[in-house]
Amino acid sequence: MPSQQQSLFDTTPPEWEVDAREQRLVASVVMGSGAPGEYDYLVPNQFADADRPEQLLEAGRRVRVPFGRGNRTVEGYCVGLETKAVDTSRLKSVAQVVDSASLLSLSMLRLTRWMADYYLCPWGQVLEGVVPAGVRKLAGTREVTLLHVPHDVQENLPHTKFGSAQQKKALETLLAGKRPLTVAQLAEAAGCTAGPIRQLLKKGLLEAQIKRVASSDLDEEVHQREQPLDLNPEQQQVLESIDEALESAQPRGLVLHGVTGSGKTEVYLQAIERVVSYGRQAIVLVPEISLTPQTVRRFRARFDRVAVLHSHLRDVQRHAQWQRIAKGEVQVIVGARSAIFAPAPQLGLIVIDEEHESSFKQDSAPRYHARDVAWQRAQSESIPLVLGSATPSLEAWHRVQRGEFEKLSLPKRVMNLPMPDVMTVDLRDPMQSQGSRGGISRPLHQAMTAALRDDGQVILLLNRRGFSTHIQCPACGYVLQCKNCELSMTYHRQKNSTICHYCDHQEPPPTTCPDCKSTAIRYGGLGTQRLEDEVRGRFRDHVCARMDTDSMRARGSHEDVLSRFRAGEIQILLGTQMIAKGLDFPNVTLVGVINADTALHLPDFRAGERTFQLVAQVAGRTGRGKKGGRVLVQTLSPDHPAIQAAVRHDYPRYAAHEMQLRKQLKYPPFGAMIRLVVRGPKEETTRGVAEDMADRLNDRRPDGDEVRVVGPAPAAIPKLRGSYRFQIQVQAPTMEPLHHTVSRATEKYKPAGEVVVTIDVDPWDMM
Ligand code: ADP
Ligand code: ZN
Ligand code: ZN
């Protein structure tokens, strides 16, 4: 990449100018925010002195540099150093080195550079997104001035003359303590004021050194140790394949398709033991939702030094973890999406569990997918990447089918436990829903009664929060919508308020129609709060708990409910997708899906895939013990292939069906896609920018029909948080021409008004 500050002048210099050039150390700097591109700066000698490591400039440290015409000071990242011939009069100099150690290794710099190119996001913005805020702020550390006694003073101590008895005492106290102290600490220890200490400093009898220290130490938890389990033959075979990949020292992608409860986690644990025995580290990514104490406990019980990176960490903790990881003190890093950037110095393996989960895609810039970043990292470090799931993403499956990734299978549950029986309840059939005004059909009610009678436990999934999800006037058809978003408001009974689930706008519930004043306004649509009411009414002798983002706001409430469920104090657990994943409770003998269709008809090409995943995953929560288990899926579309396949636990069949569709429509994984969303406060201006952008894309795409520009069209959510939204989809068989087209169309483009254009490469959210 050319350096821009230089390239402003840099055509081939005339002969006579070559002599004016000097060999100098030059830093290539990327700004944290603002101007994209790389800029060259001279490195003054004071920042190139190996004897002063705390201000030695290296790639991966931040610097302050003068920028632009006004030379205002901005912060940037040094991404490279090079001694080269430059015209010194035309380059500015680095003003300050911010970090006393590098924040990013060369390999992490390469990875972030790849992200910038691939996700069409300025490198500086990627760096700001990858280095946690707590690390950038050096949270939890502070600079202190530490005192120590110089060597020659120590040797001459018997002959030293002190100005006062207090000075002598202070110096002796410091020597006796055998570690450096601050002025305040020494004054207290020696029982004097700061005065005598300053005198000692002045005379050179004490020396001061500035150091950055951690203000708190980490509280390590101690955990009960557990031995590895004896693997069954299938697990053993998978472990051997992973071992073989580890030994090959090659980048290898392994897709582990293992049904729910097949013992995938046990295999990860044992593979990681090998990695740790080589003195290397492993990263395990799990969806945020699965970062439960249950998961964490399993890792802590096997390894001495585990770092857990979840989104609730405070800046200080995150920074401390980062430092431990960077020093190689941690064996295993378990965390959500961003843990893929953990600065492990000798990474040996990356595992992504529940690889298909949408939370691995970040929905703000840089809009990266952790799976793709992980594969990039695995390639650059020549290590294996294991992608585990009961319902692999079509992206991963496609790579298997093309021979890029290898397939590993665990087709059976551990201990020969059978897969649960799954049945659908056809909600269109009046016989089945008869006698039920709520969400629970007659067959489901009967199954619940039977399960509870046999002392089993029940999980009910309903992927809709709130009490009533739909407030409508039957007289005039008016639907209560958010004033910032064109979306239905949901009634929440506890708060006695209607709430927009997208922007959190709240309004008092209307008692008459705001439009025609009819008093017949109806609160319809079933949310988890209303379902909870219904369950309590139907099963008075049993304890029921609800788990959704509303009931789980308080810290620790999630763990609390799960441990009470495990202990059997709660018999019926109902909730949103929060309960669909990862839980392993042997006594759950029935899972009920209240409405499998909630996501099936969304205008999103992955709607079917997500429905399949959700039903298959929640079905996997039962039948994990001796009592077996069954699943009832209530649906209006019992014949839909996604639901049919989930009922039969038949992932390959579903994948084959869905691949066929995607291929016909040229949707991912058969072809690349970039989605542009244009949003702004005024509908007409926003539409204008969207049309303009589509024209620019069309003008810059290669000749022929390789690159297709679809749109602009109003987005599926046409208004959100007060902004009108339009989308443009750009598609091509491969990513390369798309990158080319989109970057040329958006480079240096300044939209009118307050309109914002976002670029989403490999979009996940199509709404
Ligand atoms: P998955 O990750 O595929 O859902 P887990 O690794 O969580 O499966 O295993 C499910 C349950 O089976 C866990 O309780 C685990 O301790 C147990 N398990 C796993 N492997 C074995 C084995 N080889 N022998 C006995 N129990 C096992
Ligand atoms: Zn009305
Ligand atoms: Zn809203």
Image (cartoon, helix red, strand yellow):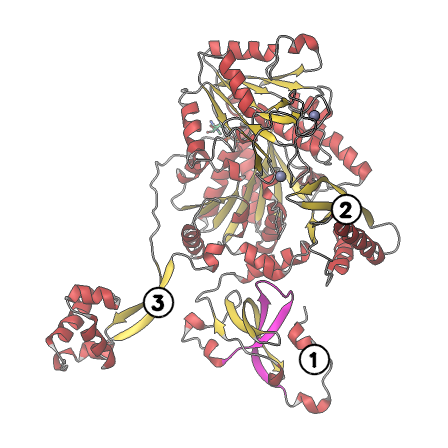
Which residue is situated farthest in the bottom direction here? 16
| Outermost residue to the left | 165
Q: Which residues are magenta?
A: 21-44
> What kind of residue is marked 3?
Lys
Q: As drawn, is 318 to the left or to the right of 341?
A: left
User: Which image quarter: residue 385?
Assistant: top right
Q: Work out whether 68 lies above or below 633.
A: below
- Left or right of 563: which side holds 487? right
From the image, tell me which residue sits under label 3: 211
- Kind of residue sitting beneath label 2: Gln
Q: Where is residue 295? Give x, y as percent.
A: 46, 35
Q: Residue at x 19, y 78 (%)?
A: 155
Q: Does the magenta portion include 37?
A: yes
Residue visible at 41% across and 27% down in the picture: 563
Q: Residue at label 2?
A: 729
Looking at the image, residue 348 sits to the left or right of residue 729; the answer is: left
Is residue 609 shown above or below 16? above
Amino acid type of disc 1?
Phe
